[in-house]
Amino acid sequence: MTKIIAIANQKGGVGKTTTAINLATAMAAIEKKILLIDADPQSNASTGLGLLEEDRNPSLYNLLTDKKFNPNSIKETKIPYLNIIASTIDLAASEIELAEMDDRENIMKNILNKIAGYDYLFIDCPPALGLLTINSLVASDSVIIPLQCEFFALEGLSSLISTIETIKSTLNPQIQIEGIVLTMYDKRNSLSALVEEDVRGHFGKKVYKTVIPRNVRISEAPSHGKPVLIYDTSCVGSVAYIGLAKEVIFNQE
Ligand SMILES: Nc1ncnc2c1ncn2[C@@H]1O[C@H](COP(=O)(O)OP(=O)(O)OP(=O)(O)O)[C@@H](O)[C@H]1O
Ligand SMILES: [Mg+2]
């Protein structure tokens, strides 16, 4: 059985891609077979995993346009057990192209249904609630929501949750919120603690115990085309993502 988890929050820069890359890497490290789907035209997950531009095709854009899975779209990364379907800037056009298709919310689901042999598929969503994110949510069993520990953290969360509820009542009855992960936590800043208290007060057990700290090694790693877990295995950021992976796996078992 493959579990499909979307990493989503329409707010930009909250740690979606960092979480997708490092959760995927932490799970691959314990030999879970992982496929990361880069569903963001910014292609940060593809770049962060070191995929060269010329090695990205056929990309997710081609699959969505053809409405068909193509096994050649699955690319190996340098990390054993971690493969990727990459994104290119072309994917930006998908928002418009999908809008004109029949059954436009189900295109990604129909493609991902053809993929077998993985323990987890993670979908790195773009910072918008457009058709790429809707397609990702319709295709997924659950959603992980990264929340940045800052003043406006909860702003916009209600529209994400109501989008998930709408999808649950229409296109994908099985979708659940897998969990909320607090990111970029700064223990020297009392605001982080206040945001944490607020989010835990609202969402209780849905919030992972593991909190991802603000860590310079995490922000350096993508420019080396590596997950932080490979770039600096023992830094606090890596340790946190290993903790998060344990929680996500433990929740299933
Ligand atoms: N825990 C962290 N500590 C320090 N920097 C971080 C941390 N998490 C993410 N960053 C940095 O913050 C920026 C935004 O992170 P990321 O790209 O993961 O967010 P995102 O939600 O995917 O953004 P977008 O909405 O644009 O897709 C990146 O430069 C990333 O390296
Ligand atoms: Mg991103």
Image: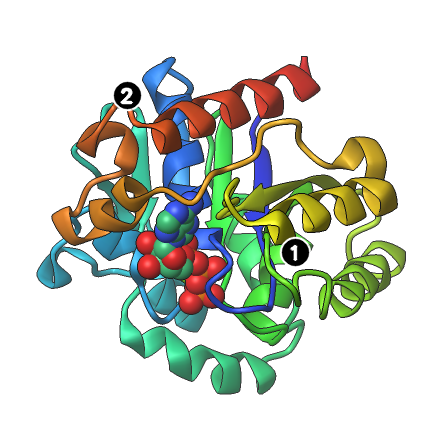
Q: Measuring 50% from the left and 69% from the top, which residue is drawn there?
A: 12
Quadrant for residue 30, please give it: top left
Picture quarter with ligand 1: bottom left
Report the front residue among 51 and 2.
51
Q: In this view, does 211 lie to the left or right of 117?
A: right
Tag 2: amino acid: Ser
Counting residues from the N terminus, which is met first, the one under dot 1 or under dot 2?
Answer: 1
Real-space CA distance between mark 1 and mark 2, rounded to the nearest whole angstrom: 33 Å
Q: Can residue 93 be seen in this view?
A: yes
Q: What element carries label 1?
A: helix
Numbered marks: total = 2
Ligand 1 within 8 angstroms of badge 1 C-beta: no
Q: What element carries label 2?
A: loop
Report the front residue among 205 and 200.
200
Up-down: is 196 above or below 70?
Answer: above
Task: Tell me if label 1 and label 2 are in contact, CB under 8 Å.
Answer: no
Residue furthest to the right: 169
Tag 1: amino acid: Leu
Q: In which quarter of the image is the N terminus?
A: top right
Q: Mark 1 points at which residue?
A: 137
Give the percent coordinates (x, y) of residue 137.
65, 56
Q: Mark 2 points at which residue?
A: 234
Mark 2 burial class by Cα count in 10 Å: few <14, some 14-19, many 20+: few
Q: Measuring 27% from the left and 54% from the top, which residue is drawn there?
A: 46
Give the percent coordinates (x, y) of residue 17.
41, 52
Mark 1 burial class by Cα count in 10 Å: few <14, some 14-19, many 20+: many
Q: Measuring 58% from the left and 39% from the top, which residue is drawn there?
A: 4
